[in-house]
Structure formats: structure tokens, C-alpha cells
Amino acid sequence: MNWEMSRVVRTITDILIVPMIIFGIYLVLHGHLTPGGGFQGGAVIASSTALLIVSYGTLGKHKKDLSSIEAVGLTLFILIAFFGIGYTMFYNYLAGTGGIFGGTVPAGPNPGYINTGGTVTLMNLMVGIEVSAALSLILWMMSRESGIMEAKDKGSEGMEVKG
């Protein structure tokens, strides 16, 4: 199935791709404060992959990159979980320590500071990386199997082989 989307679809894709990825990153980073988190943000980021596949019919040759990114996200998630093993697995050892991820939560309603999550923010980030890469890899493989991402052979269109 060799086809190409119209210029309008490709232009809208070019316009929407960056806001989709930024919104996905927002969902990942604010997962401990608002509805969202690593899985939801990763799914939004992976939907940008689906949009690229539908619009352009290709992602290039990034299968190895996606597999590596997925493995790194999962490995870092497990390592962060094991760092707190002195207390219990997944212990939030950064909460309230100060610094970039261990800010103290003020009394009263949470004002929405990103750095108050401790390891929850880091875990959301790793889950977001893993989910976006895994779903993108699944979409890539499905599009390869369906024939959407086949290379176009421009030289053989309309020509018959004489024998």
C-alpha cells in the first residue's frame, strides 16, 4: 500500500507535532500534581508517532533507537526503585530533602510545585520515556507489517515488463 497524504495533512502534522510532544512532557512532569503521569504522557507522545506515520508513511530507520530508549527508561525506573531499598522498594527518599526534586511542601493547599514529588517525579519521567518508546515501537512494527511504510518504487510505476 503505497500512498501519500495531501499537503494539508502534512502541514497540519508539522504544526501539531511539537505541541503534542510538549503536552505529553507536561503530563509526565505534573503527574504527581494533576491527573496524568508517565503512562498518559507517554501515550500522548507516542500518538505523535502515529500522526507522523499516517501523514508521511515513514519514521526512517529508528527501530534500534526506540528499543534502546525503551530499555534505558525501564532500567532507570528499576534503579530508582532499588535506591530506596534500605527502607522499602519505591521509598520516596528525596521527599523533603530540598534541591531539585526534594522540595518541601508548604502547609495548606499544594501550590503545584514540580519539585515536591521526590522520586515520584523521576519515576513518572522514566515511565513516560519507556511508554512513549514502547508504544512508538509497536506503532512502527504494525505499520511495517501493514505495508504503510513500504519504500516507494518510483521507477516501476506504469511500466510493464516485456518478456
Image: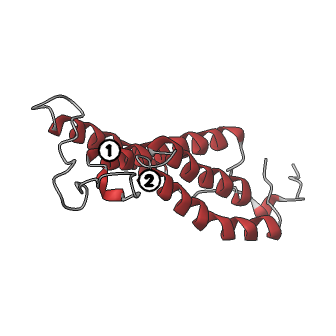
What residue lies at 67% left-to-right and 69% top-to-bottom?
A: 14
In terms of depth relative to the viewer, which is nearer, 53 or 119? 119
In the displayed structure image, the side of residue 134 where residue 161 appears, left or right: right
Judging by the rendered image, the residue that carries numbered circle 2 is: 30
First along the sequence among labels 2 and 1: 2
> Relative to 70, is 162 above or below?
below
In the displayed structure image, the side of residue 11 where residue 25 appears, left or right: left
In the displayed structure image, the side of residue 90 where residue 1 appears, left or right: right
Instruction: State the scheme by which the image is colored.
Output: secondary structure
In terms of depth relative to the viewer, which is nearer, 23 or 59? 23
SS for callout 1: helix
In terms of depth relative to the viewer, which is nearer, 118 or 6? 118
SS for callout 2: loop
Circle 2 packing at 10 Å, graded few (<14), some (14-19), many (20+), is many
In the displayed image of the protein, which residue is found farthest to the left? Answer: 86
Instruction: Measuring from the top left, give residue 93's x and y in whole percent.
Output: 17, 43
Q: Mark 2 and 1 residues: CB-CB less than 8 Å, in contact?
A: no
Instruction: Measuring from the top left, give residue 104's x and y in whole percent.
Output: 23, 55
Circle 1 packing at 10 Å, graded few (<14), some (14-19), many (20+), is many
What residue lies at 44% left-to-right and 47% top-to-bottom?
A: 31
Three-letter code for the amino acid on which mark 2 is drawn? His
Q: CA distance from mark 2 to mark 1?
A: 10 Å
What residue lies at 18% left-to-right and 35% top-to-bottom?
A: 82
Q: Quadrant of residue 130?
A: top left
Three-letter code for the amino acid on which mark 1 is drawn? Val
What residue lies at 22% left-to-right and 54% top-to-bottom?
A: 102
Judging by the rendered image, the residue that carries numbered circle 1 is: 120
Label annotation for residue 74: none
Instruction: Measuring from the top left, give residue 123's x and y in whole percent.
Output: 33, 44
In the displayed image of the protein, which residue is found farthest to the front? Answer: 108
In terms of depth relative to the viewer, which is nearer, 104 or 141? 104
